[in-house]
Amino acid sequence: MEKESRMPTRYGSLESTKWTAADPAKEEIVSMADSTTTVGDIEGELFKIERIREVLVRRESELRYMMDDIQLCKEISRLKKELQKLIALPEKEKSNEEKQREEELVQQIHKLVETRDFLVDDVEFERLREKEEDKEMAEFLQTKLSKSCLQKANQRFSHWDHMPQEERGGGEWQLNRRAIACL
């Protein structure tokens, strides 16, 4: 018996894959597990993922601010308790160290309160910036997306209209969520 000398079949290799478009209308189809995925579908999915990432980054930032605020409040409370103990002592009975510690505590509390004020101002600035970004995105999406698409998204998120304002966020962001769901 003679062995035939031929190349083994390489599954998935470029040499053995022939790219033919039987239907010219389907040339935009991407060759992956789901052969019905188009470039537009992928771009839409990437857009959704990017918006979700932005929401998560915003939430992470918000949580970090909250943690910083909690830590500052705890430290302020601790220092206030210590200061109250020192203030409760009669002035005649206080030692120089206690009077000095009292002054240090007042300065530390003042510094922490200023830090917290800065934090609150920073949070407000971020909130306004995000609100402006959401407004710009809503305007962009409103001009780019069809009305029927927005109507479908409105139907998907109709339960939002019955939620309290605190739970659902601002109107611009609500429009963005609906527009993203439409993609």
Image (tube, grey):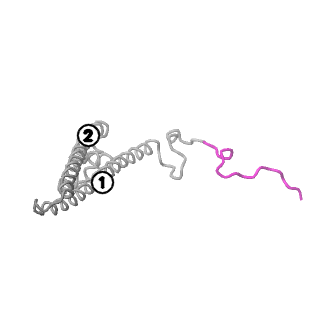
Describe residue 36's horizontal placement relative to residue 78 as left or right.
right
Dot 2: what SS?
Answer: helix
Q: Position of residue 107 (x, y in %)?
A: 20, 49
Q: Position of residue 104 (x, y in %)?
A: 22, 52
**Residue drawn 55% across and 47% down?**
31
Image marks 2 and 1: residues in contact by CB distance under 8 Å: no
Hey, which quadrant is residue 18 in on the image?
A: top right
The reply to whether residue 183 is in sight is no
What's the residue type where badge 2 is placed?
Arg
Q: Point out which mark residue 129 bears.
A: 2
Q: CA distance from mark 2 to mark 1?
A: 17 Å
Sequence-wise first label, 2 or 1: 1
Looking at the picture, tell me which residue is in the foreground, 83 or 64: 83
Question: In this picture, which residue range is highlighted in magenta?
Answer: 1-19
**Looking at the image, is mark 2 or mark 1 nearer the viewer?**
1
Q: Is residue 104 magenta?
A: no
Q: Which image quarter holds the N terminus? A: bottom right
Tag 1 residue: 63
**Residue drawn 57% across and 41% down?**
21
Dot 1: what SS?
Answer: helix
Disc 1 crowd rating (10 Å Cα; few below 14, some 14-19, many 20+) is few
Q: Is residue 13 magenta?
A: yes
> Is 159 placed above or below 136 here?
below
Looking at the picture, tell me which residue is in the foreground, 92 or 110: 92
**Residue drawn 72% across and 52% down?**
9
Q: Position of residue 161 (x, y in %)?
A: 19, 54
Describe residue 177's horizontal placement relative to residue 91 as left or right.
right
